[in-house]
Image: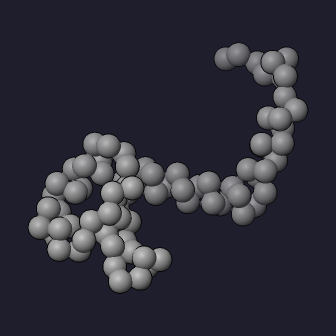
Amino acid sequence: MNVLTPTSARKNFFSVLRAVKENQEPMQIGTDDEDESIVIMTKSEYRSLIETAYLQENGVLDEVINRMKDATDDDFVEV
């Protein structure tokens, strides 16, 4: 992930937004405390992360993964 200084991000804000959108890759704006740095990402990537976290919290993701491990081609119907 690219890391920018706040000054660089401010000076090039439109370019930063365009790069995040076109590359579908988040960018980090560094702060004094790296754990509190800012990450800019597309809304679709954000939604995907939120959905994955929700499915993980509720055990749904683990269940899907377990079913996929035991699945065979006969378990699926082509649509």
- Quadrant containing the C terminus is top right
Residue 47 drawn at (x, y percent): 49, 55
From the viewer's perspective, tell me whether residue 20 is left or right of residue 47.
left
**Residue in the image at 69% along x and 55% along y:** 55
Residue farthest right in this picture: 70
Q: Where in the figure is residue 4, as x and y percent of width and height?
A: 27, 65
Can you tell which quarter of the image residue 13 is in?
bottom left
Q: Residue at x 35, y 83 (%)?
A: 32
Q: Number of callouts in the render?
A: 0
Residue appearing at x 25%, y 49% in the figure: 19
Q: Position of residue 62 (x, y in %)?
A: 78, 50
Farthest-out residue, left: 11
Report the coloring of the rendering: one colour
Q: Is residue 43 left or right of residue 15?
A: right
Picture quarter with the N terminus: bottom left
Up the image or down, 65 lies above or below 42; here it is above
Residue occupying the point 31% across, 69% down: 29
Q: Nearer the viewer, residue 42 or 33?
A: 33
State whether residue 4 is above or below residue 31. Answer: above
Return the x and y of residue 12 as percentages of the image width and height. 14, 62
Q: Is residue 58 left or right of residue 20?
A: right
* Nearer-the-camera pick, 20 or 77: 20
